[in-house]
Amino acid sequence: EKTAEKPGVPAVEEKTSPPSSKKLRLQRRAASSSQCGTCDACMVEDCGICAPCKDMKRFGGPYKLKQRCKHRPKCEAKG
């Protein structure tokens, strides 16, 4: 038996939780650089104490250096 949907009634969609801010930040970082965003090296957080980290907006810097954290390893997938 087929059940016909009522006209004018939208189908109910499953609700999914929005991605976390960390995941979005890593995806954005991967899209704009030479990182895949999925390997263990890409999932490492920035240290917050090296000069490039102190320059980052999220650590209160002016964002003039525009470099990656010196203590974060290079991407394993993209090399």
Image: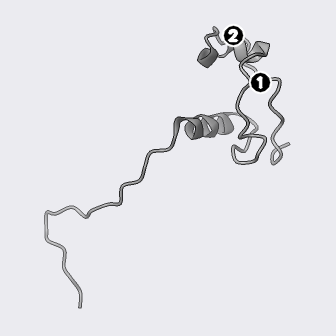
Q: Residue furthest left?
A: 7
Please state the horizontal and vertical placement of residue 79, each as a whole percent of the image: 86, 42
Residue highlighted by disc 2: 64
**In the rendered view, does 71 fall on the left or right side of 53?**
right
Asked whether the residues under the numbered discs 1 and 2 touch, taking CB atoms below 8 Å apart as contact, a structural biologist would say: no
Query: How many residues crowd around disc 1 within 10 Å: few (fewer than 14), some, or many (20 or more)?
Result: some
Q: Earlier in the sequence, mark 1 or mark 2?
A: 2
Please state the horizontal and vertical placement of residue 68, each as a whole percent of the image: 76, 24
* Residue in the picture at 60% in, 36% down: 28
Corner quadrant of residue 41: top right
Colouring of the image: one colour
Corner quadrant of residue 62: top right
Q: Residue furthest bottom?
A: 1
Please state which amino acid type lies under the numbered disc 1: Cys
Please state the horizontal and vertical placement of residue 7, each as a whole percent of the image: 13, 68
Query: How many residues crowd around disc 2 within 10 Å: few (fewer than 14), some, or many (20 or more)?
Result: few
Determine which of the numbered discs, if any, sits on residue 69 in the image: 1
Name the secondary structure under disc 2: loop
Determine which of the numbered discs, if any, sits on residue 61 in the image: none
**In the rendered view, does 72 fall on the left or right side of 29?**
right
* Residue in the picture at 69% in, 43% down: 37
Corner quadrant of residue 11: bottom left
**In the rendered view, does 51 fall on the left or right side of 26?**
right
